[in-house]
Amino acid sequence: MIGTAAYLTGIAVLGLAIGTLLRATAAAISTLVALVFLLPGLGALLLPASWKDNVLQYLPTNAGSSFTDVQTSAGQLSTGAGAAVFAAWVLIPLAFAAMALKRRSA
């Protein structure tokens, strides 16, 4: 339950960071929806089989599901690694958004 709350909060903060960077509501929502919903599905369809296991587990949705699932399945990151990858997906855009916001208002 705590993992799910952390995941949803992280997605919201990621959306805030993308919105701050792009400065356009429609573009930020489209980018977040593409990143969270479309990219994992398209990656599973379009990537070669040798790349799927190595690339898809590091997307924010799959990294988040590795620490929100009760029992991890094969091909998923461990709980700690999934939390670390998801935190990187949230904190790196947030840092760039903070720098951009500081530069714009200075």
Image: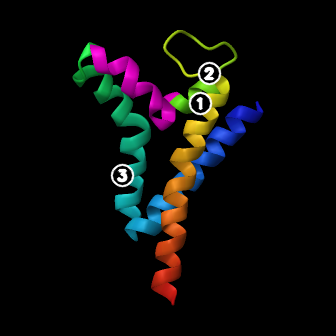
Q: Is residue 99 magenta?
A: no
Q: Which residue is mark 2?
A: 78
Give the mark nearest the N terminus, 3 or 1: 3
Q: Please name the amino acid that badge 1 sits on.
A: Gly
Magenta segment's dominant SS is helix
Decide if residue 40 is on the left or right side of residue 6. left
User: Above or below — where is 38 with respect to 98?
Assistant: above
Q: Tell which residue pokes out farthest to the bottom in this image.
A: 106
Decide if residue 97 is on the left or right side of residue 51. right
Place of residue 6 in the rendered image (x, y in percent of width and height, measured from the top left): 69, 41
Q: Which residue is mark 3?
A: 30
> What residue span does the magenta drawing correspond to?
50-62
Place of residue 95 in the rendered image (x, y in percent of width and height, measured from the top left): 54, 63
Which residue is more in the foreground, 90 or 54? 54
Q: Of the residues tagged 3 and 2, which is closer to the observer?
A: 2
Decide if residue 77 is on the left or right side of residue 31. right
Q: Is residue 68 visible in the rendered structure shown here?
A: no
Q: Secondary structure at mark 3?
A: helix
Q: Secondary structure at mark 1?
A: helix
Q: Are marks 3 and 2 in contact (CB under 8 Å)?
A: no
The colour scheme used here is rainbow
Q: Which residue is mark 1?
A: 82
Q: Secondary structure at mark 2?
A: loop
Decide if residue 14 is on the left or right side of residue 50. right
> At 58% from the left edge and 32% from the top edge, which residue is drawn?
64
